[in-house]
Amino acid sequence: MSEYEFDTLAVRAGIARSQFNEHSEALYLTSSFVFESAAQAAARFSGADDGNVYARFTNPTVTAMQQRLAALEGGEACVATASGMAAILSLAMATLQAGDHVVASMGLFGATQQLFGTILAKFGIETSFVPATDPDAYRAAIKARTRLFFIETPSNPLTEVIDIAAVADIAHSCGAILAVDNCFCTPALQRPLELGADVVVHSATKYLDGQGRVLGGAVVGSKVIVDDVLKFLRTAGPSISPFNAWVILKGLETLRIRMEAQSATALELARWLEQQAGVERVYYPGLVSHPQHDLAMRQQKSGGAIVSFEVAGGREGAWRVVDSTRLMSITANLGDTKTTITHPASTTHGRITAEARAAAGITEGLLRVAVGLESVEDLRADLARGLAG
């Protein structure tokens, strides 16, 4: 369906109707599939026949979600996983081995930092974390066994914007691949593969579902890379449930509409926050004051729906703002139609060291708001109570 536009792909890609000719995509809740003969079973298990085998690694509903997301990202193939972190782990296990080296941007999501810096390190995989927006730092970090560059743009929670094309060139110069976490923008706002990235990873839990209902993840890229990830998933089993895949599949239908609306509200809220006396700094790529604003406007279709800001008074001041809200949900998830607010230093980045938080710019006064679909006037009023002090 490559000849169709984004909005058409969002509602039509991946559809394969059953014998009942249903209009809405079917949900196949089954753990296994029946074969017509012993020969067909053997062919399915060997891969000679592309049909379904076992729901750990093949399911029609999951396939539909994978095909739709691949179409939206412009990738050859996609494999869905149980969560966003399962997607990153699966990619690492499929592409790395003991002794390999990873170059990763600072300011990654806390669990991603833990995965690369602590868990994978136990298995002999070394990771160098470099300043996110400094191309020279990526180049200087290259080692003889550098195999993977991993970046998140915009970053969580400071919304640093990384030049994907520049980092892709650096990665390819040493034979490594570049993976981009596209969670904040989604393909509705940013398509990393078109900018030179080799792989895109998603926490589909966020905007791809869009309503905070299920967990899911995905790896999108070339068929060669995705097939390697699928081999790991087939054996290790970090698989998405068909139900979760079906929910995400339906969420993709409204992805662009939601992202555009939430981004527009986020920009209004960010501009308002810049004018508030209790706010020391606002981080939002759509603001002219953002250090990478020009790059963001070239690389993304809008600033996205995440607004982070520092308030006076450190943790006490930040918690006062959080506890004064009556409308926003105090939760660490993002990408929902309901606006959420969180204090990263004590939640999403609370498990990393104070030194790592400081290096990533995660201060005690920092708050992250993931803007939903509510009225911007109501969101401003909700924050104003705590900012008034």
Image (tube, rainbow, N blue to C red):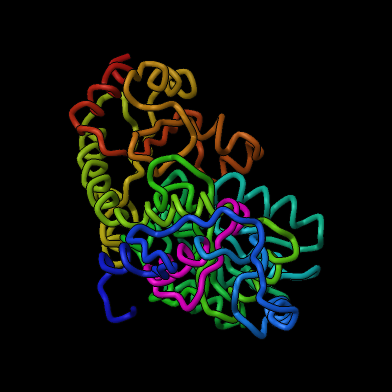
Q: Nearer the viewer, residue 226 or 12?
A: 12
Query: What residue is at 44 percent from the left and 50 percent from the top?
Result: 247
Q: Residue 27's x, y, as percent?
A: 48, 55
Q: Nearer the viewer, residue 372 or 250?
A: 250
The total number of labels drawn is 0
Q: Quadrant of residue 145?
A: bottom right
Identify the main secondary structure in magenta: helix
Magenta span of residues: 62-87
Query: What residue is at 57 percent from the left and 64 percent from the top?
Result: 59
Q: Residue 230's x, y, as percent?
A: 64, 70
Position above or below: 275 against 39: above
Q: Residue 204's x, y, as percent?
A: 48, 53
Q: Classify the position of the N terminus by image quarter.
A: bottom left
Position above or below: 9 against 358: below
Q: Residue 85's x, y, as percent?
A: 60, 52
Looking at this rendering, what residue extends furthest in the bottom direction?
A: 48
Can the viewer see residue 144? no
State left or right for residue 246 relative to residue 223: left
Q: Nearer the viewer, residue 359 or 297?
A: 297
Can the viewer see residue 270? yes
Query: What residue is at 57 percent from the left and 38 percent from the top?
Result: 349
Q: Does the magenta run of residues contain 84?
A: yes
Position above or below: 347 against 325: below
Query: What residue is at 54 percent from the left and 47 percent from the top?
Result: 109
State left or right for residue 97 relative to residue 363: right
